[in-house]
Amino acid sequence: MTEPAGPGSAAGAAAATPLRSALTARGKMLLGGTVVVLAAGLYLRYPELIGLGTVGVIAVLAALAAVARSPRVEVRRTIDPSRVTRGSTAGATAHVLVQNAARRTLPAMSARDRAGSDAPPFAIPRLRPGATHPAAIPLPVSRRGVVPSGPLLVARDDPFGLAHRTLEAGLAAELYVRPRAIALPEIAASLARAVDGPQSDSTMEGTLAFHALREYVPGDELRHVHWRASAHAGKLVVKQHVDTAHAAVAVVLDLMMDDDAWQSADGGVEVFDTAVDCAASVAAVAAEQRHPLQLIDGAGGSLLPGTVRRRGGCTTDDVLDALTRVTATPAGAHRIDPTADTLRRLAGGARGSLAVVVSTRPMGGLADSLRLLAGCYARVAAVQAVAPGGPGGRSGAARTGQVVWVTVQAVDDLPAALLRARTAA
C-alpha cells in the first residue's frame, strides 16, 4: 500500500508543534529581553535601546518565519506486509522514501515517524532538487490492533536556535496486527459433516447431504470411510456430509473484563487477546467452509462491518480484520451485563450447528442461557481465557449436557481442550 504526499492525518495532528509554541527557551529569553529593552527605550527615549529592541524583534520574527512552512518534500510510504499475525517473528516494516520537491537544496534535518506509540528518529541528509532518501522503520507487532504509521514528523530549526518546530509530511498508513487464528480440526470436522447423523433432538431428519471426499482426521467414524476411494488414493478417505438445516455458526465475543483484570499490570491485554484469538480461530473455520456466520459481541452487536453484512457471507480476511479492531471495556463501566439476554435472543432465532461464547470472565452465571442455546444449536461451547498463574489460571475442559466448558491460558490450548470436553462424561 503506497501513500502519496499530502496533509497529515488526525492521528498525527497532536504530535505537530503549533507556531505559537515554536520558540525555544533561548528564543523566549530573547523575546522577553527584547520587550524589556524596547519598552525602556520608548519610555526613556533612547534611540540606541529602541534600535536594539527592534533588532531583537526582527530576529524572533525571522526565526518564526523560518519554521512556519513545512519543507517541500514528497513522502511515499509502503508497509510490508500490510497485515501480520500478532507476535509474528517476521515483523513488519514501513519503507519511507523522502524526495526533495523544491527547486533549492534541502538542508539536512532530523525526522521521526509515528509508528504506533513510538517515534524512532532518523536523519535526512542534504537533498538536491529531486533527490531522494530512503528509510526503513520497524513497526510493533507484539500486540493485536491497528498500528498507525505516519505521518512523517520533520524537525525544523532556525540557524540561531531561537525556534524549533515539528511539522507533518505525507499521509498516514495502517498496519493490521491480526489475532492468531489456529487450526481447530475437531471444530472443522464437526462443521464439515454430521458424524452420527442428527447431533441433537432439534435436528431435522433428511437434512444430511453428501458434499465431498476428504482425508481422514482423528476422531472420524470408520463407517464414513470410503474404502474404494481410500484404496485408490493409498490413504484413508472419508465421505464429507453437510447438515443443510444446521449450517449456521454463531460466535459471541464478550468484550467486558472484570475490573481486577482491567486494573492489572498490563491492563488485561494479553488475556483479552487470547480470547480474541479463540474467537478468531472458530470464526475462521466457519468462514473457510462458507457457513453462515454471526460474529457478535456480548451486547448483540455485529462485529463485522456493514459492507460485509450487506455483501452476504464473509471471508477469513473479513473475520480477522474485524477482530483486529475490537477493544475491551471494564465491566464496572456497565450498569447491567447484556450477555445473558443476548444468548437468549440468539436461542430464539434460527437453528444452527455451532455456537461458541468466548469471554475472559467466569461464565457460570450464563449456564441457563447456554442450556437454552443448546436447544437451538447442535453444539454449544463456552470458552474462558484466563491469565497463566492467576486465579483459576489453569486450562481445563468439562461437559454438562450439550454444553462444553473450556478454560484456556493460550489459544494453543484450545484444540486439545475442545477434544477433551467433547469426550468428557
Image (cartoon, rainbow, N blue to C red):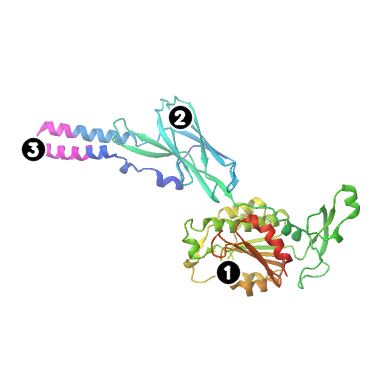
In primary-sequence order, the first of circles 2 and 3 is: 3
Which range of residues does the magenta coloring cover?
Answer: 30-53
Q: Main secondary structure of the magenta part?
A: helix
Residue closest to the far left:
44
Quarter of the image for residue 18 reads top left
For disc 1, the marked residue is 339
Residue found at x 69% / y 61%: 418
Image side of residue 190 versus residue 231, left or right: left
Residue found at x 49% / y 35%: 75
For disc 2, the marked residue is 101
In primary-sequence order, the first of circles 1 and 3 is: 3
Kind of residue sitting beneath label 1: Thr
For disc 3, the marked residue is 44
Secondary element at image label 1: helix
Proximity of marks 2 and 1: CB atoms separated by less than 8 Å: no
Q: Is residue 265 above or below residue 48?
A: below
* Most foreground residue, 276 or 146: 276
Secondary element at image label 2: loop
Distance from label 2 to label 1 (Cα)? 56 Å
Kind of residue sitting beneath label 2: Ala
Kind of residue sitting beneath label 3: Leu
Image side of residue 51 versus residue 240, left or right: left
The quarter in which the N terminus is drawn is top right
Q: Position of residue 313 (x, y in %)?
A: 69, 56
* Most foreground residue, 364 or 27: 364
Q: Position of residue 161 (x, y in %)?
A: 30, 33
Quarter of the image for residue 350 reads bottom right
* Most foreground residue, 139 or 274: 274
